[in-house]
Image (cartoon, grey):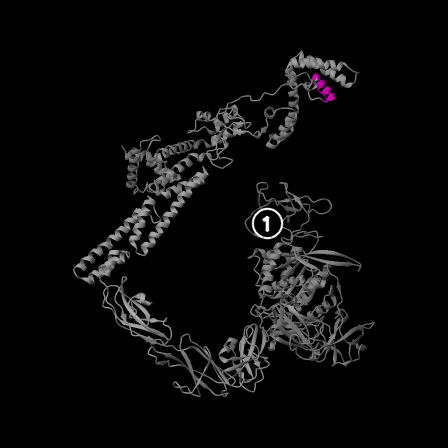
C-alpha cells in the first residue's frame, strides 16, 4: 500500500514513523518549537510536545511510540510536516479524491451535499456507514458546509483561498465501512479511508498557485472535475432569456490543462503517456439545462444504484453527455481528456436540485445524481461492486 | 515638655515612611511618644491631648496628611483610650512589646527557619554551623547573632557505632549463632532463661544450674549444642568481659542493617519511607527505637548518604531550641530546659509550646495578649456606656476565639443595648415628624440617661438630640409669648397668627392651644344642601376668621347638629363645598358647617332640611316573545313605580299603563305585540316629612318583543384567499351574525340571549352575503365560529364549528425522475409535519381523502430525502396535494389545502419501448429488435449513425440509415434489418423518433453504449 501524508503528500513509508508525545507535564517532557508544522502552516513556530521517530519493526506496523520521558503515545504524525495523521491511518485502504473546478462552479455545495447523501440516502442503499475520522473534519463540515445548506437553507459561501485561510488546506477525512461479499458466499467488513479536498476556484487559476496551494491534486487517487454548463457559451446563448445566468468565469479547459501540467510535473509523467488517475467530468447544475438535453437521455431519470454501481446507466450517461458536450462546443475538452487521461467519464448532476433564490433555498436541497461520480470512483478503486441496472 | 521638633524627627518622619511604604502604623505608645512603662494617668492624658493638637495642626502638611488622617480616625482614637486605663495599658504594653520584638526579629525569619530545620535532631554539626554562617552572615546579621540563635549543642561525631575489634572472634560468633539456632533461642541470656543483659552473678548461678541439667540424659545434637554454649558462656560471660558479647550482638545487627542501608541508599538518598522501613527492621533485630535511629543515621553518615529522618512518633518540637523531644510525658526540653507545654489561654487544655494554635479550640496563641486587651477595652466601653465601641471590641474578641462564652456574652449585651437605643431613637424621630416636641423632649431626656456617649448613625448623641428639641421648643415658646402680648393688647388677629405659628412648631404646645381656644374663629355663612343627580352637595360661604382654617361638615338626621358629636362627619376641607355620598335615599337630612382653626371650632352654620331622593340604578329591559322583562337596583325605603307606553315615551306620571312590580327590583310585562316597541319610565315615589308625595323624574328604557327565530343549524367553510368564508342556510326570520371565538361559546345551541350579550362570543365577522360571513384573517391554530340569529333584541345561538387554521404549504412542485416522483414545497413557518396525498383521477379533496394514497412526512425526513418521493409511480397521471400539519392536543390536524399552489400534477410517464441492436457476422447489417409490454403503434423511428465518435442525439444525429414504422404487440418482438453499406466506420448508431416531440409520449430505451458502437 502506497502511503502518502494527506496534508503534505510526502511519502509516509520509511523505517521511522513519527509520534507526538502526549505528556501533559512540560517539566518532564519539555515543549519544543515545531518548525516543520510551522513551515506547513506558514506561521511562526509554536512550542508543542516533542515529535520523535520510532523504529519500525521488521514485520507489521507500529501503532504507538514511547517518548524518552516514558510516556506512551498513539498520536502519530507525519514525519515530514508533523500534522497529526487520522486515526488508524495506514491500517486501511485510503483514497484521496480531489474536487477541481473553476470559481463558483458549485464545488463546496457539491461536496456538502455529496457527504450528506453518502451518510444518509446512499448509505442506506449500500448499507455502509460514513463517519468523519477526526474532529477537524466534523467541525469543518458542520461549520463550513452543513450549517449553511441544512440549517440556514442558503448556499455555501465562496471558499476562501488557501493563502487566506489555513484550514482550507486541511482535507475532509472520512472512514467508509461496508460489508463485502466474496464469491457470493462469504462476507466481511471493509474499512476505507476517504479524503476529500475542496479548494477555492481561484487557487486553480495558474500552475504556480496550484503547485503550492493545491498540490494534493497531483497525488490524488481520483479527480472530480466539476463543470458548470451555464459557463459554456453555446449553452448560455440557448438559455439567454429563459433563466438567470451566472457571471462568466474561467475557461474550464485552462484548469484542466493546469491540472495535467501539475500532475505531469510532480509525478514526472512524460507527455505521450496518459495519466492513470481516473477523472469524473461532472456537469453540475444540470437541472438548469435539462430542456437542452434530448428526451431519451438518461439525464431525465434518477440513477438506481441498489447496492451496486449501475455500470450500464453510467455508460449510457457517459456517451450521451459526451455527445452533448461536443454539441455545445466542448469537443476540445473531450479531445484533451482523451489524449491525456487514461480513464474518464462524463456525468450530469445537480447538487441543490434547483436554482437558489438570491442565495436562499426555501424548498431545501434536492440533490440529483450527485453520488454518480463518487460511486464510479469507488467502483474503479474496487471498493464497491458494479452491475447492470433494471431500467 | 513635648518637643515638637524632636517628636517630628524621632516619631512622625519614620512613621510616615513606614506608612507610605508598608501601610504600617506606629504602635499606641510610639505614636504618643510615651515610654512603655508610663503609668501616671494625668501625664498620659495631657500627652494625648498635646499630640492630638499637634496632629491637627500638622495634618495639612501633604507629607503627613494620609498618616495623620488615619491616626485621627474614629477607630484609632478609640484604640488610644487603652492608655487611660491601668489594666488596659498593661495589656497594651504586652502587645506592643511582642509586636516590637516580632518586628525586630523579622530579619531573622529565614535564619530561624533553617535553624529550626537542622536543630530537630537535638544538635547541630560543625558543618551545619559553618553553612549557617556562610549563608546568613551579612552586614546586618553577625556570626555572633547566628550562634546566639542556635539553642542546641554542637556535636562533632554524634554517633558511635560498635566496631568489630571490640566484638568476639568471628568463629565464636558463628558457634553461638549455630547452636542457638539448634535450640531455637535468640541469645545466650534467653538460653539461660535470663533477661538480656543480666549481671554476672546471676549468669554464673544460672550457668551452674543449666550445666547440671545438661549433664543428665543421653547424648543428642541438642545436648551437644547446649554444652558448647555453656562452654562459651563460661569463657566469655563469666570468665571474660560480657560487654564483648553485647558488642558482638550489636555488631551483627549493624552488619545486617548496613546491608539494608546499602540497598535503600542506592540512589545516594534515604527518604522518609525508606527510613521507616529500616527503622522497623532495626526494631525487629532487637534494638530500642532511639538506638535504631542512631545506628541508621550513623551508618548512612558512614556511607555518605543523604537522609531524611522523620520525627519519632509522639515527638514534639521545643519552642526554644527547636530540638525534637521524644515522648509526650516530658515537661521540659532535654536540650535547653525550656518548658515544652503550656495551657491554652482559651480552653485551658495542654498545648505544645511550639504550636501556633491550640489543637482543641483553634485559638492562636500569639493572639492571647491582643484578645485580653480587646476584652478589657470592651469592658471599659460598657462601663462608660460607649455601646458601639463595646460591640466592636467584643466582636473582635469573638473573632479571635478567646474566652468564647464571656466574649459572646459581652457582644450580645452590647447588641441588645444598641438595639434598645436605636428603637428609642426611632420613637423620638416619629414624634419629631409628628411635631410633638414636648413628648419628644421627654423621651430624649430618658434616652440621654441610657445612651451615655453613644453616637447614633447620623453621628449625633442623645444629648445633641435633646439640645435640638429644646431649641425648637424655645422658638415655640417665643411665639406663645408674642401671642399673649397681642392678646392682652386686644390684637386678636396677630395673637391668632402667633399661636398658630407656635403650634406649627409643636402641635402639643398646651399654652398655644389654650390661647387659641380663647380666640375662637367665626362660623361660615349661607350653608345649604342641594341634590345633584344621585348625591347631595353641601355648599357654604367663606368664614371671616383669620389664620389657617378648615371647614368641618357634619350631617344630622331630624335637626342640624350643634356640635360635631351630634351628627356624622362628612368632610374636613378648605373648599366651600363638598359632596355627601353617604346620605340614604328617602332620608331627611340637615348639615352644619364649623370653622376649624387649629382644633378650635366656631359655632355651626346650619342648612335647611333636605329630602334625599334618588332614581333606580342599572335599569335593564329585555324583550322576549310577547313579553318584556325589566330589572333594576334600588336600596332606599321608597316605592318604585313603572309606566309603559307603546311606540312613545311616557312623558309624566300616569302617561301610559302602570306595570306592577313582580318582586324587588323586577317587573314583567306580558301579552305584548311582537314587533312593537314599548317604552318604560321607572319612577321612585318618596314621602316628605310633611306627608306629601315626592316623585323623581324617572328613567326611560325601551324593548321590542319579537317572535323567536330559528337557530342556524350548520356552518360550512370555504377558502377564498385571503379570507375564510363561513356559509350557512339563511333562516326564515331574523338576521344571522357570525362570531369567531377562541374558546367554547358560553351558551348551548338554541339558547335565547339578549343581543347586548352577544359581545361575549368574541369577534363579529363581516357579512359577504346574506348566507355568508367572511373571516379576513383566520388565526393560526384552532378557532371556533358561532352563528346567532337576531330578531329585535333577542338572539338565538346557532351551530358552532371549529376550524384548525394552519397556513398551507406553498409552491408545491412535482417532477418525475423515472423511478420516483419528487415532490417539493415551501414549508410554512412553525410547521414540521405534512401529509402528501395523490390520486389518479382527480385532485385529493382532503388529507384523509379515502380515494387517495398518502403518507405523512416530517420536516427532518424531507431534509434527508431532499423532498418527498413517490417511489415506483404508476404510468398514470398523478394529482398531488400537500397539507401542512400541526399537533393539537396530541392529534395531528392538517390544513385545508385550498390554495392552488398546494397542488401539483405529474403527467404519466412516457410509454417505454426497449430496443436491442445486434450486428451481423461480417458487420454489414444491423438487426434492431423492439419490444413493449402493451400493444402500441409507434411514430416513425429513424436509425441514425454518426461516424465522428459521438452518439447521435436529436439535435445532431448524423446519417439516417433507415426509417422504421413499428407496430408492437405485447411481449412479441419486432425485428428490423438495416444495411451498413456505404457508411464510414467506426460509427455510433441509435434509434430516435423522427419527430422529437414524440419522445414526450414514448421512450426508446436502448442497449449499452458498447452495443451501439460499430467498429
Report the number of numbered marks.
Answer: 1
Q: Position of residue B427 (x, y in %)?
A: 35, 52
Q: Is B1005 placed above or below B137 here?
A: below
- The majority secondary structure of the magenta stretch comes to helix
Of A212 and B722, the residue lying toward us: B722
Q: Position of residue A5 (x, y in %)?
A: 65, 52
Q: Chain of mark 1?
A: A
Residue beneath label 1, please?
Answer: A37
The answer to which image quadrant residue B985 occupies is bottom right
Which image quarter: residue B802? bottom right
Check disc 1: other Cα within 10 Å, few if <14, some if 14-19, many if 20+.
Answer: many
Vertical side of B236 occupied by B98: above or below: below
Query: Residue A218 or A265: which is nearer the viewer?
Result: A218
Q: Is residue A56 magenta?
A: no
Residue range in magenta is B171-184
Disc 1 on helix, strand or loop? Answer: helix
**Residue nearest the observer in this picture, A334 or B862:** B862
- Extreme residue in the right direction: B921
Tell me if I can see residue B402 in this picture: no
Q: Tell me the quadrant of the picture where the N terminus of chain B can be found.
A: top left
Q: Residue at x 36, y 77 (%)?
A: B613
User: Whole-percent x and y of residue A359?
Assistant: 56, 68
Q: Is residue B179 magenta?
A: yes
- Asked whether, in this view, residue B792 is left or right of residue B463, the answer is right
Amino acid at each position: 500500500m502506497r502511503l502518502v501524508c494527506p496534508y503534505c503528500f510526502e511519502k509516509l513509508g520509511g523505517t521511522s514513523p513519527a509520534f507526538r508525545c502526549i505528556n501533559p507535564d512540560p517539566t518532564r517532557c519539555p515543549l519544543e518549537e515545531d518548525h516543520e508544522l510551522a513551515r506547513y502552516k506558514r506561521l511562526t513556530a509554536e512550542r508543542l510536545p516533542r515529535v520523535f521517530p520510532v523504529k519500525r519493526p521488521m514485520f507489521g506496523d507500529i501503532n504507538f511510540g514511547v517518548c524518552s520521558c516514558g510516556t506512551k503515545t498513539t498520536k502519530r504524525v507525519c514525519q515530514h510536516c508533523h500534522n497529526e495523521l487520522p486515526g488508524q491511518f495506514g491500517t486501511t485502504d485510503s483514497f484521496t479524491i480531489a474536487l477541481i473546478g473553476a470559481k463558483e462552479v458549485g464545488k463546496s455545495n457539491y461536496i456538502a451535499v455529496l457527504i450528506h447523501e453518502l451518510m444518509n440516502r446512499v448509505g442506506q442503499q449500500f448499507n455502509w456507514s460514513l463517519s468523519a475520522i477526526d474532529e477537524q473534519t466534523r467541525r469543518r463540515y458542520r461549520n463550513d458546509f452543513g450549517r449553511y445548506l441544512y440549517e440556514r437553507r442558503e448556499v455555501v459561501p465562496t471558499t476562501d483561498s488557501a493563502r487566506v485561510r489555513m484550514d482550507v488546506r486541511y482535507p475532509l477525512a472520512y472512514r467508509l465501512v461496508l460489508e463485502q461479499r466474496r464469491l457470493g458466499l462469504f462476507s466481511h467488513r471493509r474499512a476505507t479511508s476517504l479524503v476529500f479536498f475542496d479548494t477555492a476556484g481561484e487557487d486553480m487559476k495558474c500552475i504556480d498557485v496550484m503547485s503550492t496551494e493545491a498540490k494534493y491534486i497531483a497525488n490524488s487517487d481520483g479527480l472530480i472535475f466539476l463543470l458548470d454548463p451555464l459557463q459554456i457559451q453555446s449553452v448560455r446563448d440557448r438559455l439567454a432569456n429563459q433563466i438567470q445566468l451566472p457571471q462568466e468565469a474561467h475557461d474550464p479547459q485552462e484548469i484542466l490543462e493546469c491540472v495535467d501540467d501539475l500532475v505531469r510535473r510532480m509525478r514526472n509523467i512524460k507527455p505521450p503517456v496518459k495519466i492513470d488517475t481516473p477523472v469524473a467530468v461532472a456537469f453540475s447544475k444540470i437541472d438548469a439545462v435539462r430542456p437542452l438535453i434530448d428526451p431519451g437521455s438518461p439525464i431525465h431519470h434518477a440513477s438506481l444504484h441498489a447496492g451496486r454501481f449501475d455500470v450500464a446507466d453510467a455508460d449510457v450517461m457517459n456517451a450521451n453527455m459526451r455527445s452533448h458536450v461536443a454539441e455545445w462546443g466542448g469537443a476540445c475538452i473531450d479531445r484533451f481528456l482523451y489524449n491525456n487521461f487514461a480513464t474518464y467519464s462524463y456525468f450530469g448532476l445537480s447538487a441543490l436540485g434547483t436554482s437558489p433564490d438570491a442565495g436562499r433555498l426555501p424548498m431545501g436541497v434536492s440533490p440529483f445524481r450527485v453520488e454518480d461520480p463518487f460511486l464510479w470512483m469507488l467502483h474503479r478503486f474496487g471498493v464497491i461492486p458494479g452491475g447492470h441496472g433494471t431500467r | 515638655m513635648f518637643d515638637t521638633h524632636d517628636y517630628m524627627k524621632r516619631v512622625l518622619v519614620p512613621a510616615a515612611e513606614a506608612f507610605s511604604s508598608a501601610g504600617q502604623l506606629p504602635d499606641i505608645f510610639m505614636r504618643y511618644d510615651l515610654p512603655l512603662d508610663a503609668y501616671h494617668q494625668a501625664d498620659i492624658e495631657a500627652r494625648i491631648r498635646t499630640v492630638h493638637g499637634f496632629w491637627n495642626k500638622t495634618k495639612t502638611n501633604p507629607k503627613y496628611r494620609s498618616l495623620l488622617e488615619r491616626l485621627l480616625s474614629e477607630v484609632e482614637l478609640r484604640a488610644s483610650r487603652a492608655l487611660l486605663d491601668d489594666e488596659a495599658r498593661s495589656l497594651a504594653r504586652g502587645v506592643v512589646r511582642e509586636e516590637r520584638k516580632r518586628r525586630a526579629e523579622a530579619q531573622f525569619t529565614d535564619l530561624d527557619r533553617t535553624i529550626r530545620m537542622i536543630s530537630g535532631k537535638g544538635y547541630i554539626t560543625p558543618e551545619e554551623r559553618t553553612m549557617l554562617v556562610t549563608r546568613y552572615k551579612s552586614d546586618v546579621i553577625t556570626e555572633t547573632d547566628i550562634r546566639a540563635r542556635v539553642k542546641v549543642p554542637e556535636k562533632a561525631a554524634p554517633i558511635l557505632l560498635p566496631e568489630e575489634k571490640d566484638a568476639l572472634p568471628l568463629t565464636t560468633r558463628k558457634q553461638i549463632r549455630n547452636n542457638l539456632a539448634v535450640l531455637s533461642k535468640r541469645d545466650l541470656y534467653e538460653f539461660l532463661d535470663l533477661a538480656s543483659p543480666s549481671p554476672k552473678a546471676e549468669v554464673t548461678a544460672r550457668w551452674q544450674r543449666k550445666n547440671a541439667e545438661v549433664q543428665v540424659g543421653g547424648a543428642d545434637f541438642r545436648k551437644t549444642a547446649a554444652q558448647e554454649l555453656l562452654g562459651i558462656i563460661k569463657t566469655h560471660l563469666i570468665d571474660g568481659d560480657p560487654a564483648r558479647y553485647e558488642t558482638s550482638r550489636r555488631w551483627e545487627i549493624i552488619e545486617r542493617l548496613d546491608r539494608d542501608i546499602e540497598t535503600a541508599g542506592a540512589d545516594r538518598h534515604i527518604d522518609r519511607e525508606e527510613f521507616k522501613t529500616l527503622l522497623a527492621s532495626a526494631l525487629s533485630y532487637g534494638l530500642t527505637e532511639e538506638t535504631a535511629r542512631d545506628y541508621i543515621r550513623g551508618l548512612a553518615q558512614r556511607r555518605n548518604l543523604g537522609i531524611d529522618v522523620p520525627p519519632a512518633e509522639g515527638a514534639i518540637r521545643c519552642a526554644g531550641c527547636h530540638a525534637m523531644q521524644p515522648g509526650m510525658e516530658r515537661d521540659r526540653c532535654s536540650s535547653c530546659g525550656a518548658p515544652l507545654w503550656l495551657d491554652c489561654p482559651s480552653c485551658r487544655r495542654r498545648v505544645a509550646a511550639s504550636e501556633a494554635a491550640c489543637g482543641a479550640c483553634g485559638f492562636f496563641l500569639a493572639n492571647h495578649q491582643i484578645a485580653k486587651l480587646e476584652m478589657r477595652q470592651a469592658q471599659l466601653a460598657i462601663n462608660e456606656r460607649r455601646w458601639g465601641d463595646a460591640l466592636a471590641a467584643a466582636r473582635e474578641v469573638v473573632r479571635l476565639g478567646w474566652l468564647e462564652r464571656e466574649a459572646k456574652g459581652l457582644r450580645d449585651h452590647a447588641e441588645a443595648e444598641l438595639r434598645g437605643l436605636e428603637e428609642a431613637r426611632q420613637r423620638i424621630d416619629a414624634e419629631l415628624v409628628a411635631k410633638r416636641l414636648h413628648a419628644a423632649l421627654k423621651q430624649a431626656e430618658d434616652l440621654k440617661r441610657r445612651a451615655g456617649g453613644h453616637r447614633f448613625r447620623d453621628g449625633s448623641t442623645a444629648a445633641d438630640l435633646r439640645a435640638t428639641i429644646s431649641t425648637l421648643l424655645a422658638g415655640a415658646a417665643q411665639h406663645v409669648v408674642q401671642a399673649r402680648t397681642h392678646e392682652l393688647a386686644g390684637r386678636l388677629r396677630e395673637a391668632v397668627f402667633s399661636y398658630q405659628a407656635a403650634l406649627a412648631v409643636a402641635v402639643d404646645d398646651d399654652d398655644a392651644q389654650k390661647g387659641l381656644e380663647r380666640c375662637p374663629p367665626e362660623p361660615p355663612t349661607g350653608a345649604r344642601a342641594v341634590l345633584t343627580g344621585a348625591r347631595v352637595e353641601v355648599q357654604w360661604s367663606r368664614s371671616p376668621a383669620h389664620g389657617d382654617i378648615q371647614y368641618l361638615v357634619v350631617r344630622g338626621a331630624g335637626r342640624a347638629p350643634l356640635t360635631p358629636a351630634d351628627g356624622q362627619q362628612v368632610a374636613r376641607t378648605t373648599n366651600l363645598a363638598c359632596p355627601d355620598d353617604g346620605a340614604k335615599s328617602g332620608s331627611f337630612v340637615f348639615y352644619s358647617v364649623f370653622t376649624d382653626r387649629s382644633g378650635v371650632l366656631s359655632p355651626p352654620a346650619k342648612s335647611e332640611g333636605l329630602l334625599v331622593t334618588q332614581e333606580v340604578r342599572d335599569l335593564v329591559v329585555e324583550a322576549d316573545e310577547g313579553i318584556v322583562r325589566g330589572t333594576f337596583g334600588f336600596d332606599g325605603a321608597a316605592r318604585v313605580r313603572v309606566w309603559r307606553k307603546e311606540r312613545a315615551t311616557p312623558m309624566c306620571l300616569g302617561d301610559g299603563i302602570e306595570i306592577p312590580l313582580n318582586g324587588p327590583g323586577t317587573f314583567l310585562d306580558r301579552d305584548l305585540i311582537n314587533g312593537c316597541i314599548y317604552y318604560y319610565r321607572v319612577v321612585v315615589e318618596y314621602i316628605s316629612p310633611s306627608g306629601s308625595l315626592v316623585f323623581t323624574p324617572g328613567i326611560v328604557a325601551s324593548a321590542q318583543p319579537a317572535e323567536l327565530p330559528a337557530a342556524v343549524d350548520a356552518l360550512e367553510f370555504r377558502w377564498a384567499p385571503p379570507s375564510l368564508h363561513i356559509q350557512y342556510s339563511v333562516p326564515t326570520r331574523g338576521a344571522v351574525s357570525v362570531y369567531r371565538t377562541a374558546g367554547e361559546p358560553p351558551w348551548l345551541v338554541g339558547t335565547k340571549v339578549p343581543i347586548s350579550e352577544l359581545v361575549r362570543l368574541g369577534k363579529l365577522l363581516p357579512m359577504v352575503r346574506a348566507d355568508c360571513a367572511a373571516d379576513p384573517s383566520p388565526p393560526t391554530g384552532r378557532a371556533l365560529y358561532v352563528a346567532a340569529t337576531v330578531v329585535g333584541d333577542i338572539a338565538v345561538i346557532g351551530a358552532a364549528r371549529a376550524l384548525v387554521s394552519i397556513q398551507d404549504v406553498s409552491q408545491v412542485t412535482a417532477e418525475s425522475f423515472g423511478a420516483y416522483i419528487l415532490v417539493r414545497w415551501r414549508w410554512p413557518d412553525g410547521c414540521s409535519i405534512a401529509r402528501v396525498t395523490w390520486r389518479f383521477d382527480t385532485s385529493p379533496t382532503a388529507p384523509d381523502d379515502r380515494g387517495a394514497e398518502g403518507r405523512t412526512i416530517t420536516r427532518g425526513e424531507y431534509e434527508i430525502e431532499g423532498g418527498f418521493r413517490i417511489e415506483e409511480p404508476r404510468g398514470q397521471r398523478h394529482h398531488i396535494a400537500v397539507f401542512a400539519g400541526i399537533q393539537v392536543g396530541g392529534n395531528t390536524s392538517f390544513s385545508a389545502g385550498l390554495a392552488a399552489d398546494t397542488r401539483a400534477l405529474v403527467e404519466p410517464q412516457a410509454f417505454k419501448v426497449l430496443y436491442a441492436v445486434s450486428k451481423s457476422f461480417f458487420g454489414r447489417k444491423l438487426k434492431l429488435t423492439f419490444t413493449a409490454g402493451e400493444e402500441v403503434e409507434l411514430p416513425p423511428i429513424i436509425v441514425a449513425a454518426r461516424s465522428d465518435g459521438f452518439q447521435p442525439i436529436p439535435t445532431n444525429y448524423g446519417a439516417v440509415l433507415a426509417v422504421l414504422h413499428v407496430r408492437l404487440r405485447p411481449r412479441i418482438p419486432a425485428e428490423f434489418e438495416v444495411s451498413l453499406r456505404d457508411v464510414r466506420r467506426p460509427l455510433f448508431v441509435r434509434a430516435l423518433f423522427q419527430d422529437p416531440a414524440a419522445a414526450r409520449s414514448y421512450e426508446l430505451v436502448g442497449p449499452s453504449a458498447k452495443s451501439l458502437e460499430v467498429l
